[in-house]
Image (cartoon, rainbow, N blue to C red):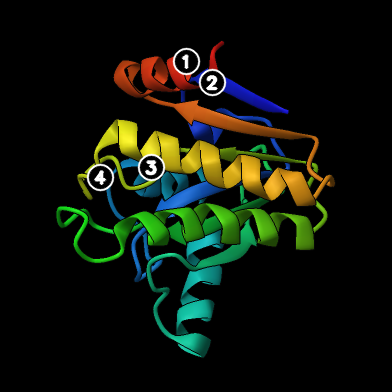
Amino acid sequence: MLKLISGDITRTRADVIVNAANSSLLGGGGVDGAIHRAGGGAILRECMEIVASRGSCPPGEAVITTAGKLPAKHVIHTVGPVWHGGMYNEDKLLADAYTNSLKLAVKYGAGTIAFPNISTGVYNFPKERAARIAITAVREFLKTDKSLTEVLFVCFDRENHQIYERLLNV
């Protein structure tokens, strides 16, 4: 079931929350910084171990860590694409970020997952386009995998919430 909520993803009760990470996985601004601050040092330590063992995380890919002090069990860190006018496969990379996050959540036994609005902040992906891609990717995944009981779209800002509200018909 798809659900839309407004608020701070760091306070969302779900088995897994998704972090709109940068490829270094070492925290940053926006959602990424908020998750690292609220979750504490355990998240950063695990991210550093991942980078040390496999290198940076490219756009469209996802990795999983503890959730530290957050109410979730795990954080999935996915890297969305930076918007360059749609000329560099950005749509597919964004869809992959959602799909790979969902696959990882299922692999780790999650029943619920919460997504922020990936790539719509400093990466400048057009918000409506990103929302359409997110919803389509999640719906396509849920057609073939029934293990997730709830997928939350957590919108921090009013504009994204209104876009999702309209696209989800809620």
Going from N to C along the chain, the mark reached first, 4 or 1, is 4
Residues packed near mark 3 inside 10 Å, few (<14), some (14 to 19) or many (20 plus): many
Residue at 53 percent of width and 52 percent of height:
98
Residues packed near mark 1 inside 10 Å, few (<14), some (14 to 19) or many (20 plus): some
* Badge 2 vs badge 1, beta-carbon distance below 8 Å: yes
Residue situated furthest top in the rendering: 170
On residue 165, which mark appears?
A: 1
| Callout 2 amino acid | Leu
| Callout 3 amino acid | Val
* Badge 2 vs badge 4, beta-carbon distance below 8 Å: no
Q: Report the quarter where the C terminus lies.
A: top right
**Can you identify the residue that label 4 sits on?**
125
Going from N to C along the chain, the mark reached first, 2 or 3, is 3
On residue 31, which mark appears?
A: 3
Q: Report the quarter where the N terminus lies.
A: top right
* Residue depth check, mark 2 versus mark 3: number of the one nearer the observer: 2
Residue 164: x percent and y percent? 45, 22
Q: CA distance from mark 4 to mark 3?
A: 15 Å
Q: CA distance from mark 2 to mark 3?
A: 23 Å
Residue 61: x percent and y percent? 49, 68
